[in-house]
Image: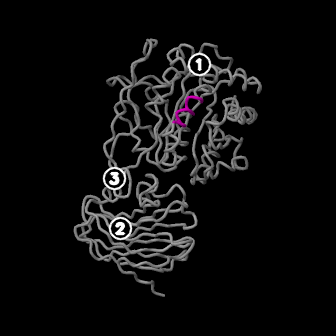
């Protein structure tokens, strides 16, 4: 049966459940490829955040309700109507071309197909001369159902203009953060200035850490990390010199929290435990509020006490991730306030596929290169690469913070299976009650020599006291240590 044809301004109901909204076209020779974009809009007619833009650099909405697929002459937005967030009033469908116009495009049309692929609606767009972007149509709520409105509105400013009109933060040159204030008191002698971080190599090799301070002019690469001392009771003043550099109030909080960590470890019979504590921060778009209200910064300060107690030198390797992953400069206890200011940041939208260095001249990560999607498998793979290249020492204890939206279940499962024979324990911490996918099934994940991962989620981590937080962080790690030694993973 032929689809119902709409004219500009017309509307009609769409099928229920899972649908496919497909834009197709023909291109004359030399015409650049077109891109389909979906914008999930709130009641105000604007996106609720940059995460509501589904396009080639961000092909899946965090809710899972919309997923983009593309070929040279078509673009498909798969929409699960029941999964669309309740505060999304409409979904806009547009095509655009970068650095050109649609003059060489013909037979541009939009169809809506049901779950079986049968076309229900069609809208043909005929007037595209001089335009760089066209809104083809919009899905909108009508009571408990959804309808399609044929729009056909053109934009000469391309995807940038279209995105800005609907509330997207357009990709503008990022300003470097201000230089940190001078320390309140003289710090100990500064270490040798390292190079700015570089993109990690493809194959494992001896680990060269990113900088812990803004880099000086390039010098010879620093030597790899020395092997940490053997496991034993750490010297009580292992990080004392660093802690003296902290503001008084932060130093007091750290001291109190280290004592609480000691109490937890003592109760578990682990007074002499040492570990390489690794911090991982989710920077995806759904984390924006948690970064903006200071939740993530407070989490980092609380985790610093675990690092100060378990690491032999008060140094924590750290990563940030969203669509992509990047290793951050090491977090050192004495540099905690400045490190939080420079490196605790959410990812940003990148509209155009421009090539930029991942690291900026001040040692910080260009968060436009991190993006706003959830790609946990990328950061996990990079951590394994780095840890595998380290000299023998204490096991790695990865503290992995995320607010959910996890959908790469198959990849994550395989990574955990492959890493089960390595001296790495993954402790995942959920910030909120979102979709945690495979993380909620870790206890039943088969195919591992030992259970090498734990997970718990909290509604509001600020409402959990330090003792309860450290108890939960340190519940499964000791069990893994025992199992890993018995299995020969640790020696």
**Residue depicted at x 44% and y 37%:** 200
Residue position marked by numbered label 1 in the rendering? 252
**Label 2 residue SS:** strand
Q: Residues within 10 Å of mark 1 (few under 14, many from 20)?
A: few
Residue 295 falls inside the magenta stretch: yes
Residue position marked by numbered label 2 in the rendering? 135
**Label 1 residue SS:** helix
Tell which circle, 3 or 1, labels the residue nearer the N-terminal end.
Answer: 1
**Residue depicted at x 35% and y 67%:** 135
Number of the front mark, 2 or 1: 1
Query: Distance of mark 3 from mark 2, alpha carbons?
Result: 18 Å
| Stretch in magenta | 294-302
Q: Is residue 295 left or right of residue 195?
A: right
**Residue depicted at x 35% and y 57%:** 163
Residue 20: percent from left, percent from top: 49, 71
Q: Nearer the viewer, residue 474 or 209?
A: 474
Number of the front mark, 3 or 1: 1
Residue 245: percent from left, percent from top: 49, 16
């Amino acid at each position: 049966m032929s689809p119902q044809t709409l004219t500009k301004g017309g509307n009609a109901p769409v099928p229920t459940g899972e649908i496919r909204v497909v834009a197709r076209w023909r291109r004359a020779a030399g015409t650049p490829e077109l891109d389909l974009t979906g914008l999930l809009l709130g009641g105000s007619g604007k996106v609720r955040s940059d995460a509501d833009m589904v396009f080639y650099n961000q092909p899946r909405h965090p809710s899972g309700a919309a997923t983009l697929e593309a070929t040279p002459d078509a673009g498909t937005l798969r929409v699960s109507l029941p999964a669309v967030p309740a505060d999304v009033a409409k979904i806009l469908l547009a095509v655009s071309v970068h650095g050109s116009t649609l003059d060489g495009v013909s037979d541009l049309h939009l169809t809506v197909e049901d779950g079986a692929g049968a076309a229900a609606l069609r809208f043909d767009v005929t007037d595209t001369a001089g335009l760089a972007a066209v809104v083809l149509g919009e899905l909108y709520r009508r009571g408990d159902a959804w309808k399609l409105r044929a729009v056909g509105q053109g934009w000469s400013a391309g995807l940038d203009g279209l995105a800005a009109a609907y509330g997207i933060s357009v990709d503008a040159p990022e300003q470097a953060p201000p230089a940190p204030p001078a320390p309140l008191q003289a710090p100990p002698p500064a270490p040798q200035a390292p190079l700015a971080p570089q993109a990690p190599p493809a194959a494992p090799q001896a680990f060269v850490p990113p900088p812990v301070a803004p880099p000086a002019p390039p010098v010879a690469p620093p030597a790899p990390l020395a092997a940490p001392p053997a496991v034993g009771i750490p010297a009580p003043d292992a990080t004392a010199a660093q802690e003296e550099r902290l503001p008084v109030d932060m130093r007091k909080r750290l001291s109190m929290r280290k004592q609480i960590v000691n109490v937890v470890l003592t109760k578990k019979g682990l007074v002499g435990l040492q570990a390489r504590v690794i911090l991982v921060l989710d920077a995806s778009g759904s984390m924006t509020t948690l970064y903006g209200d200071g939740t993530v910064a407070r989490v980092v300060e609380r985790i610093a006490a675990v690092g100060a107690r378990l690491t032999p030198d008060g140094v924590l390797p750290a990563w940030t991730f969203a669509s992509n992953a990047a290793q951050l400069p090491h977090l050192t206890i004495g540099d905690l306030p400045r490190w939080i200011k420079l490196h605790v940041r959410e990812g940003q939208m990148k509209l155009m596929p421009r090539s930029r260095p991942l690291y900026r001249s001040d040692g910080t990560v260009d968060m436009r290169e991190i993006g706003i999607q959830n790609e946990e498998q990328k950061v996990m793979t990079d951590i394994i690469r780095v840890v595998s290249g380290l000299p023998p020492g204490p096991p790695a204890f990865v503290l992995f913070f995320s607010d959910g939206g996890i959908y790469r279940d198959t990849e994550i499962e395989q990574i955990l299976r492959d890493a089960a024979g390595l001296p790495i324990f993954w402790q995942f911490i959920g910030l909120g009650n979102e979709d945690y996918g495979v993380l909620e099934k870790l206890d039943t994940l088969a195919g591992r020599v030992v259970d090498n991962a734990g997970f718990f989620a909290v509604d509001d981590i600020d409402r959990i006291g330090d003792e309860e937080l450290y108890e939960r962080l340190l519940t499964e790690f000791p069990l893994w240590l025992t199992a890993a030694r018995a299995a020969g993973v640790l020696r």
